[in-house]
Image (cartoon, rainbow, N blue to C red):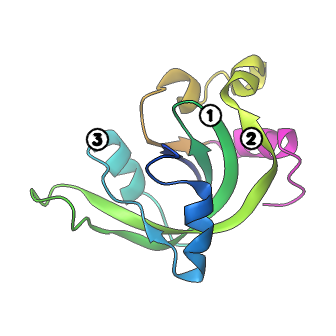
Amino acid sequence: MAYWLFKSEPGAWSWEQQVRRGAKGEPWSGVRNYQANNNMKAMRKGDLGFFYHSVDEKRIVGIVEVIREHHPDPTDATGRFGLVTVRARKPMPNPVTLAQIKGEPRLQEMALVRQARLSVTPVAPESWAIICEMGGMKDS
């Protein structure tokens, strides 16, 4: 299993909206960055991801699960980009802020810290465990 981070502006797509989609999940559409798209191509069904509210909140608020692997994004007229479908798995008991992540020396190599603008990034298993602990998550 691999771990990921999905960024979303809460005004465009929020954790609450993701939760309301239930078991059918939601296609993670609209990604127009090649590196982020390649990250989604590497995802497999069952992989987990942090759901990160960007812009004003800048915090991890929940965990999602990939339920459908990379396939064409119908919102991309060029046909170059794809998407995965994710479903909400559970909320983060104590949302973990970007400031907390930046303040943790063991997380300085995270793509969230190094490539702040990238919307879909990998998360190392060690970083996943640290953030889950910081957020009060007993099991992901």
Is 121 part of what is drawn in magenta? no
- Work out whether mark 3 precedes mark 2 in sequence or the reverse, and give the earlier one: 3
- Work out whether mark 3 precedes mark 1 in sequence or the reverse, and give the earlier one: 3
Q: Give the range drawn in magenta.
A: 124-140
Specify whether residue 2 is in view: no
Residue type at mark 1: give it: Glu
Residue type at mark 2: give it: Glu
Is 138 part of what is drawn in magenta? yes
Task: Indicate which label's residue lies in the foreground, 3 or 2.
Answer: 3
Please determine whether, in this image, residue 11 is positioned above or below residue 45: above
**Residue tagged by mark 1?**
57
Relative placement, left or right, of 83 versus 138 is left
Please determine whether, in this image, residue 31 is positioned above or below residue 45: above
Q: For the point 41% across and 60% down, which residue is it?
A: 28
**Residue tagged by mark 2?**
126
* Residue 29 placement (x, y as % from top left): 34, 59
Q: For the point 56% across and 50% down, which residue is it?
A: 4
